[in-house]
Structures are given as structure tokens and as C-alpha cells.
Amino acid sequence: MAGDYNEIIIVLMIDIVSFFVAYFIFDKIRNSKSENARSVGEMTIRALLSFVIAFCTHAITYQVLKNNEVPNILENQYYIYTLEYIEEGNYEKGIVSFLDIPDTYQSDEKYSELRNNLGTSIVDYTFDNLKNEGGLDEKKKSIEDSIAQLDTINYDSYEKLNIELENINKQIEEENKRKEIEEEKERIENAKKNQLVLIDKMNPTIYRTGIIIKYGLYFEPSVINNSDKDIKDITFHILHYDREGYPDKNNNNSLALYSSEESIEDVNISRYSSKLIKYSTDEKLDSDIESMHLDKDENKIKQYQVDCQAIGCVKSVTFYDGSTWNNEYYKYWLDKYKDQRLI
């Protein structure tokens, strides 16, 4: 209002000054022609002309001041709409009306206050709304949408939202890892259950071999064939452990094998049956399974038989019809047990 009063005073002063200046000029002109002729009519004409000039000056001055006048943002309809929408909690429409406020108001302090009011309200609303959101993905989307809205109005004081978004992303990452672990466990369990061919147990047996008599400890696998086909060839893996379940890699015997992959041809395991694959002897030539321990001292081998244990897993088989089967569980089994303690 002070600005309006100042404008009125300025215009009035200019009007008065212009009137007297015009009157003085006309008076000078009149005096230059005849100093004695000063009728009432002439004075009236001079006054009217002075008034016309003053009026024109008034109009010009008013227009100049009007053009330079700073608009009042409080009277702008979009400013008013924005305030109303904030009160209603309708922030989407509030953003639209805020963006419709003319650029001429952007330097106004009230404009900045309105933006801060709108931005703070959106941040507070977002946090209140997070309490009602269901899952982490919904909360993440809610925050990201709010940040996008705040960026639209150039409001950048939303550090709390960024911190909350970071926390939610960490929770989502942890949840995804947990799901991956659970899914991997399920895949492993399904692969284990769905083995067509598997080793049921390992049978520790001592054999006497060689011209120079030696005694060897062999773990012979008992294989179960759950398929409807006859097995011709088989490949399996054996891991050996000591009594406490640690990998039996040495035991002061350079011939001791901890891990061995065996491939046996013509193993001949009928469909829906099981068979113990024995080490090759003069009486029965089933396979050439690697010995776990080999020694001249039979008692020492017998002690190894007590102290050692083994597990095995089928890697692949070839059926008599030429088809093959690769055990999906094998790679999980090897990753789980190799170079690990058997518990």
C-alpha cells in the first residue's frame, strides 16, 4: 500500500508542476504580443490549455509508473490456487498451479515461501504415506515419485527422502539376496530329489593285490538306477575323509587319494535296480576303482578301514539305447563337499 500512496503523490506533484509550467509558458507568449490585453477570456483559455497539457502529462506519467509497477503475487490466481491445494492436500494440482505462476513473480519472496511450503508438505506427506505402503517396492516407488515432483518445482531440500530411499534400496538388496539363496537351496534340493541315478552308500573293502603282496582299501559305491533304462557306462566322483570328517589327503601315505573321479564302462546296471560296483579282482572284474590306501601291513589297512569314510556322487551315465544323463546335482554336491569338512 505504501507503494500506491507514493505513486499518487508523484502523479499529483507532476500534475501541479506541469499545470503551472504550461500556464507560465502561455502567459509569456501572451505578454510577448501585447502586455496590455489581459481579458478574462484569454486567461480562461490559458488555464484550459494548461489543464490539457497537465492532463496529458498525468496520463503519460501514470502509464510509465504502471508499466514499471511490480505485480502483487498475493493477488495472482495461481498463487491463491496453490495455497488452496496445499490446504486440501492435493499436491498434484498444487504443483500444476504453482508452475502456472508467471515468471515475473519468481524473484518475489512470497514465491520462494510458497515453493518451500509446497515442497515441505510433499515431503511430510510422503513420510506419512510410507506407513501405509505395503512392500518395499511400493515404498521405493512412492519416494521416487515424490522426488520427481519436487524436482519439477526446483525444490531440493529433500535429504530425508534420499536417506530413506537409500535405506529401502539396501533392504531390497538384502531381500533379493535372501530370495536368491532360498531359490538356490530349492534348486539344489529339487536336483537332489530328481536324480535318476545316485550313489546310495560307499562300502569300504580291503583287497590283497600285486605280485608283491599289498593290501588296499577301496570304497565301492552302491548305485541305484531309478530310470527306466539300462545303464552301460557310468562316471562318478568319490571324496575320502578321516574319522573326524576332515579331507583325508595324506595320512603319511603318498598313494592315498582324497578325491577321485572314476569312469567305468560296461557297468551293466538294470533299470529300476541297484548294484554294488566292486573293485577288480581275479574273481570279478567290475571296475578299477582307485585305492584309498595301499600298504604291505594288513593291520594298518584294517585300521584305515576303521578310521576312514567316503561319499560319492554320480556325474553322468550312458544308457544302452545311446542316450546320456548328466546329473544336475553333481556340481552342487562337489561345491558343497570338496575341500570341506564332512559334518
Image (cartoon, rainbow, N blue to C red):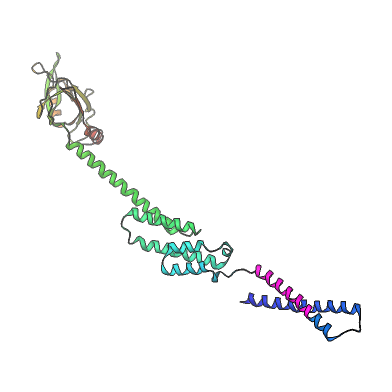
Image coords of residue 289 (percent x, y): 17, 22
- Pick whichever, 150 or 314, lies toward us: 150
Determine the main secondary structure of the stretch shown in magenta: helix
Is 78 above or below relative to 175?
below
Q: Quadrant of the N terminus?
A: bottom right
Q: Which residues are magenta?
A: 48-70
- Residue at point 67%, 75% (across, down): 7
Q: Is residue 221 magenta?
A: no
Image coords of residue 300 (percent x, y): 14, 25
Asked whether the viewer can see residue 129, the reply is yes
**Residue located farthest toward the top when viewing the structure as drawn:** 211
**Residue located farthest toward the front when viewing the structure as drawn:** 41
Is 34 above or below relative to 139?
below
- Residue 67's image quarter? bottom right
- Residue at point 91%, 78% (across, down): 33
Asked whether, in this view, residue 93 is left or right of residue 290, the answer is right
Q: Is residue 69 magenta?
A: yes
Question: How many numbered discs?
Answer: 0
Image coords of residue 157 (percent x, y): 48, 60
Asked whether the viewer can see residue 202, the reply is no
Q: Quadrant of the C terminus?
A: top left
Image coords of residue 21 (percent x, y): 80, 77
Is 127 above or below relative to 184?
below
- Residue at point 75%, 76% (across, down): 52
- Pick whichever, 128 or 331, lies toward us: 128
- Pick whichever, 139 or 314, lies toward us: 139
Asked whether, in this view, residue 168 is left or right of residue 10, the answer is left
- Residue 297's image quarter? top left
**Residue located farthest toward the bottom when viewing the structure as drawn:** 40
